[in-house]
Amino acid sequence: MGQRDPDETDTITRKAAQMAKARKQRQQSAWYGLGMFGLVGWSVAVPIVAGAALGIWIDERWPNDTSWTLILLLAGAALGCLNAWYWIQREAHHD
């Protein structure tokens, strides 16, 4: 069995380091960006619409001076923003 040439060992080490760097800095495609945009959009939109729908139902069922539609719409917006923040943080940790 022959010994490896020091130049060959350096080449292998350099290529392994390049591969590791490429894995860390994976290229994000346009589809990935659109997918993340959609995920964040839905994570905000769904709680807002659900809160507004529930508020409208409560206001029609039990009318009073309090606008449950507005209160639950704002609560849905807050929940949606927290949800979007969670997904963005989760994806940032994967990179």
Image (cartoon, rainbow, N blue to C red):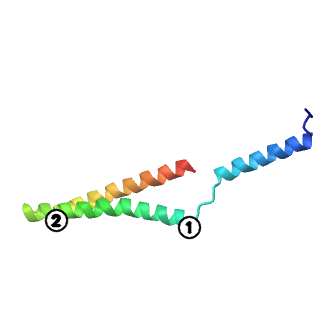
Q: Quadrant of residue 8?
A: top right
In the image, is residue 94 above or below residue 46? Answer: above
- For disc 2, the neighbor class at 10 Å (few under 14, some 14 to 19, many from 20) is some
Q: Which of the marked residues, 2 or 1, is nearer the chain's N terminus?
A: 1
The residue located at (41%, 56%) in the rendering is: 84
* Amino acid type, residue under disc 2 in the picture: Ile
Q: Position of residue 67 (x, y in %)?
A: 16, 63
Disc sitting over residue 56 in the figure: 2
Q: Position of residue 7 (x, y in %)?
A: 91, 44
Viewer-nearest residue: 69 or 26: 26
Q: Is residue 22 left or right of residue 52?
A: right
In the image, is residue 66 above or below residue 11? Answer: below
Q: Quadrant of residue 4?
A: top right
**Location of mark 1 (residue):** 30
- For disc 1, the neighbor class at 10 Å (few under 14, some 14 to 19, many from 20) is few
- At mark 1, the secondary structure is helix
Viewer-nearest residue: 33 or 9: 9
The residue located at (86%, 43%) in the rendering is: 10
The N terminus lies in quadrant: top right
The reply to whether discs 2 and 1 touch (Cβ–Cβ < 8 Å) is no
The residue located at (23%, 64%) in the rendering is: 52
The residue located at (38%, 54%) in the rendering is: 83
